[in-house]
Image (cartoon, helix red, strand yellow):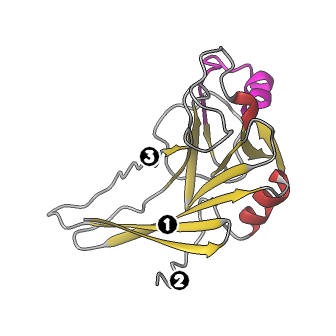
Amino acid sequence: MVRGVARVVAKDWVQVAMTIENGGNRALIWLKALYCVQYRRLTAFPGWVEKADGNRDHTFLLLGGKSQSVSEVLKKERAQKPRIMKGLVKDSRITMFKPNVSSRADAALMAVSSMDNQRKLIIGWTPGSYLLANPGIPCLHADVFYEPLKKGESSSVLGTFVLTTKDLQETMLSLKKEGIGMPRAKISLGSTE
């Protein structure tokens, strides 16, 4: 069974707790969750992009303590498939795919900026594991790690969504400091009322 509960943390911040319970007869060893965040309906944010670089200049991750655009990362890494960025978080415990960038992100945090770079949507899942950005498609992934579950056990993850006009790097570093997007972070679901 899968359950989800959302709560407003602040005027620009929402959290979603997702819980999976193993109601089956055998252990769930390899749980691979992809939580796709579609942003194309956000006013003045990139939409479907046909050109080769897509939304790469408006899509960001935290690398080496700095927010860097996917364009910068793919160029620096000389990625073989430069249209899609597939990356892992430092100390992540699971992977769904072979990454095409060798640098490990500081946290499972991804961001997209509006076309004028004034507004940013930042997403993060805790505990975090991997990142996926396909800049031609208006979606972000900063996906999670679910612990293996024996029969009757459950595991929860926490999604964080921040829509802000504040400095992107400072906000991402602040979220990381709070443990958001970290691969081995313990989460507190808090009150969901």
Which amino acid does the dot numbered 2 rest on? Gly
Q: Which residues are magenta?
A: 70-86
What is the quadrant of residue 12 in the picture? bottom right
Spatial CA distance of label 1 from label 3 is: 14 Å
Mark number displayed over residue 66: none
Rendered location of residue 62, percent (x, y): 75, 48
For the question of whether residue 64 can be seen, the reply is no
Tag 1 residue:
16
Which amino acid does the dot numbered 3 rest on? Leu
Answer few, some or many: residues within 10 Å of disc 2's Cα (few below 14, many 20 plus, some between 14 and 19).
few
Tag 3 residue:
34
Q: Earlier in the sequence, mark 2 or mark 3?
A: 3
Q: Give the SS element for disc 2.
A: loop
Task: Say whether residue 16 is left or right of residue 149.
Answer: right
Answer few, some or many: residues within 10 Å of disc 3's Cα (few below 14, many 20 plus, some between 14 and 19).
some
Task: Say whether residue 61 is left or right of residue 189.
Answer: right
Spatial CA distance of label 1 from label 2 is: 11 Å
Q: Give the SS element for disc 1.
A: strand
Cβ atoms under marks 1 and 2 closer than 8 Å: no
Q: Residue at x 49, y 43 (%)?
A: 95
Rendered location of residue 173, percent (x, y): 80, 59
For the residue pair 97 and 38, the one nearer the viewer reads as: 38
Tag 2 residue:
190
Which amino acid does the dot numbered 1 rest on? Val
Q: Give the SS element for disc 3.
A: loop
What is the quadrant of residue 9 in the picture? bottom right
For the residue pair 86 and 6, the one nearer the viewer reads as: 6
Is 81 colored magenta in this rendering? yes
